[in-house]
Image (tube, helix red, strand yellow):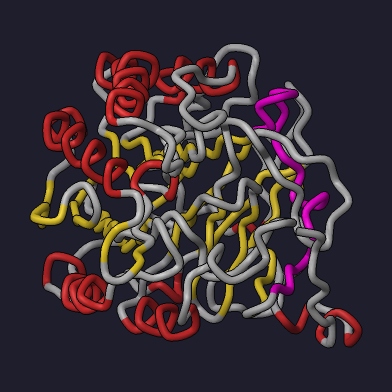
């Protein structure tokens, strides 16, 4: 399936029980029409859903908007942790994890920061206790529900920061390795390559090829970039209907206080070009603690907001931060991908119109996925980066 043929739909403006308003965005970046209202039995022509089955089951937890289920459904959570060394999780995390089976996903993805490490003062028993708590409060529920679970390690799980060629947080990486080597079967993934698990690996699920690399610091190791290049060009990847890459740090900054070196990937444009060359559709990341569905060039970005502590406001935004969880519905026959993102404080669907039209950061610009550069005014196109208060 060509990446250029994919379409992305964002659900917005949904109070509980309200009729959805859907905006269509074509990955080919052509200029689009205005958002199209979708009724239960009436579909606007620009949505181009005629090829989809006439009946789609609306599936979700009781009391929340239940989106029509795609051929493949993925639930994305990220940044679950609380304060350093914590073995407790916020109520939004616990409740969000308990709701996962109600969405009936084919896969659950975590964008990293499952525990609260990255402090030199933490001892080995304290780090081990955090992973034990993660297993007891998070992973065991996912395992009991029989849901495949993929993840990328975050900076608070097992930071890859080095000094003089050695890992700074060596205990974090030691305990993360120990935990996941014991729990690799719990992921229930169909691995293509797992020699680098839990830091980098690939798997295929429902004919989608997923690649995970270690972006727990600003540098993805050169050998991992070379591995990703080979893997994404492999017959297993190229024969898949879709290719998705996961990493904790994003390519470009989207949140206040994270728009600086060390909080975004180095050589972002070069990495993006490599993913585009292999027709990767989406890069899923965490770390910035703010939800934003963006794109740059031919690559879509899903910035998963924090489900745990410390949500952040977006750059170019005055809105208050909030915890989020995202449901991705992939329709293979149209083809389309639908994001339904919940504000887990209010349990309402996030309205895309309340998100910035674009985010200009220190190393690049991302447009909201429903917009192209041609949709921006001259002033917007010339918008300069304004640093946030750090």
Reply above or below: 249 against 27: above
Is 354 magenta? The answer is yes
Answer left or right for 124 relative to 314.
left
For the point 24% across and 46% down, the residue is: 206
What x and y, as percent, mark residue 95?
Answer: 53, 15
What x and y, as percent, mark residue 20?
Answer: 72, 37
54 or 195, nearer to the observer: 195
For the point 58% across and 12% down, the residue is: 62
What x and y, as percent, mark residue 247?
Answer: 39, 57
Which quadrant is the C terminus positioned in? bottom right
Reply above or below: 12 against 23: above
What x and y, as percent, mark residue 189?
Answer: 17, 40
Q: For residue 264, what is the image quadrant?
A: bottom right
Specify whether residue 34 is in view. no
Answer left or right for 318 relative to 282.
right
Is 93 magenta? The answer is no
Which quadrant is the N terminus positioned in? bottom left
Q: What stretch is highlighted in magenta?
A: 342-361
For the point 26% across and 78% down, the residue is: 222
Answer left or right for 12 relative to 333.
right
375 or 5, nearer to the observer: 375
Q: For residue 361, what is the image quadrant?
A: bottom right
For the point 32% across and 20% down, the residue is: 129
Reply above or below: 160 against 272: above
Specify whether residue 25 is in view. yes
Tag count in the figure?
Answer: 0
């Amino acid at each position: 399936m060509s990446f250029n043929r994919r379409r992305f739909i964002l659900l917005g403006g949904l109070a509980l029980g309200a009729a959805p308003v859907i905006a269509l965005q074509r990955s080919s970046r052509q200029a689009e029409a205005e958002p199209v209202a979708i009724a239960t039995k009436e579909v606007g022509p620009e949505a181009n859903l005629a090829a989809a089955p006439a009946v789609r089951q609306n599936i979700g937890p009781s009391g929340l908007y239940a989106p029509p289920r795609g051929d493949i459904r993925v639930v994305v959570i990220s940044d679950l942790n609380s304060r350093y060394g914590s073995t407790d999780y916020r109520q939004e995390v616990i409740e969000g994890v308990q709701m996962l089976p109600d969405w009936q996903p084919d896969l659950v993805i975590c964008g990293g920061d499952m525990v609260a490490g990255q402090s030199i003062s933490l001892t080995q028993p304290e780090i081990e206790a955090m992973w034990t708590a993660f297993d007891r409060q998070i992973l065991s529920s996912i395992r009991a529900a029989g849901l495949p679970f993929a993840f990328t390690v975050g900076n608070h799980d097992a930071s890859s920061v080095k000094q003089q060629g050695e890992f700074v947080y060596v205990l974090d990486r030691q305990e993360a390795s120990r935990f996941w080597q014991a729990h690799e079967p719990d992921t229930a993934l169909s691995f293509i390559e797992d020699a680098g698990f839990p830091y980098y690996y690939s798997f295929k699920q429902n004919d989608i090829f997923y690649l995970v690399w270690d972006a727990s610091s600003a540098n993805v190791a050169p050998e991992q970039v070379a591995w990703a290049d080979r893997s994404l060009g492999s017959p297993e990847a190229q024969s898949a209907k879709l290719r998705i890459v996961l990493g904790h740090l994003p390519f470009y900054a989207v949140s206040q206080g994270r728009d600086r070196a060390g909080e975004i990937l180095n050589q972002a444009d070069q990495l993006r070009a490599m993913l585009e060359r292999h027709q990767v559709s989406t890069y899923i990341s965490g770390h910035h603690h703010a939800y934003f569905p963006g794109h740059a060039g031919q690559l879509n970005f899903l910035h998963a907001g924090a489900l745990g502590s410390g949500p952040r406001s977006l750059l170019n935004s005055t809105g208050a931060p909030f915890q989020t969880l995202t449901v991705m519905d992939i329709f293979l026959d149209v083809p389309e991908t639908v994001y339904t993102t919940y504000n887990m404080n209010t349990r309402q669907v996030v309205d895309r119109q309340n998100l910035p039209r674009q985010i200009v950061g220190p190393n690049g610009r991302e447009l909201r996925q429903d917009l192209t550069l041609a949709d921006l005014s001259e002033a917007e196109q010339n918008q300069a980066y304004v640093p946030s208060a750090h």
